[in-house]
Image (cartoon, rainbow, N blue to C red):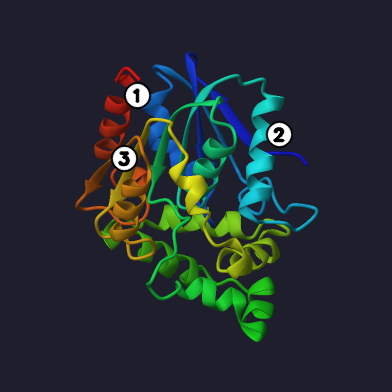
Amino acid sequence: MQVHYRDEGKGFPIVLIHGTGASLHTWDDWTTQLTKSFRVIRLDLPAFGLTGPNGNADYSIDSYTKFLQQFVSKLKLDTFHLAGNSLGGNIAWNYAAEYPEKVLKLILIDASGLPTFTPQPPIFKMAKTPILNSLFLYITPKFIIRKNIEQVYADKLKVTDALVTRYHKMSLRTGNRKAFIERAKTDFNVAEKVNLVKLKSIKTPTLLIWGAKDTWIPLGNGKRMDSMLPNSKLVILENSGHVPMEENPKESLEFLKSFLNESS
């Protein structure tokens, strides 16, 4: 599989993993600043961005975790910091549990992986509905993408036309819509219930960054995750939704840099 990624800057490496429906561009603002001190590696996960679908159509967390290990091995990364948002956060903490010797510090931003008790986002419902998901394969109006982004931002005025166009173009890449449907089915599969023992086993210093106005993965999930992790701290961004690194990059980045500069 060919993987679309960017490797920028010099210094200790930090790997950034995006969430469902996003791409490596979700980290653009962070990368501009982080590359002044770190080697920043960000990638498009299989099913998203320019990497495209996985040949075996396996979009389970286990599959993504194995993929990440193959990716960092290919780049010959020994140890690194690891950050992930939403789905990327789920992959990140599972990776840290499986390969604790690899991750020096872990950053989870509105991470998935714990059961949520809020209604599924409409775009996931559509992806699981037989007739609608067939239409979605061929017709993906830009207004649907806009509505989806507006749900993950606390301030809808920050959802610009350029942002919507970028997300829309990425969704139209050959195979991505079919892969998104397969991934959406997996996301809420009973077989992928969180392994709480695995989560509680993570001793890696962990920073949780959570948007107080996240309606997809609410703050309560962040608080539960913080209580389960033995070596974590939670910071709350009052004016952020599900993607603080996009919506409030400066504020969220200050918390990240402070955490990375702390001695372990």
Q: Mark 2 or 3 closer to N-term? A: 2
Q: Residue at x 58, y 30 (%)?
A: 6
Q: In the image, which is nearer the foreground, mark 2 or mark 3?
A: 2
Amino acid type of disc 2?
Gln
Q: Nearer the viewer, residue 120 or 95?
A: 95
Q: Which residue is mark 2?
A: 70
Q: CA distance from mark 3 to mark 1?
A: 16 Å
Q: Which residue is mark 1?
A: 260
Is 113 drawn above or below residue 10 in the view shown? Answer: below
Give the number of the disc on residue 249: 3
- Asked if residue 121 shows in the view, the reply is yes
Q: How many numbered badges does the structure rendering display? A: 3
Q: CA distance from mark 2 to mark 3?
A: 29 Å
Q: Nearer the viewer, residue 146 or 103?
A: 103
SS at mark 2 in the image: helix
Q: Position of residue 179 (x, y in %)?
A: 68, 61
Q: Residue at x 32, y 61 (%)?
A: 218
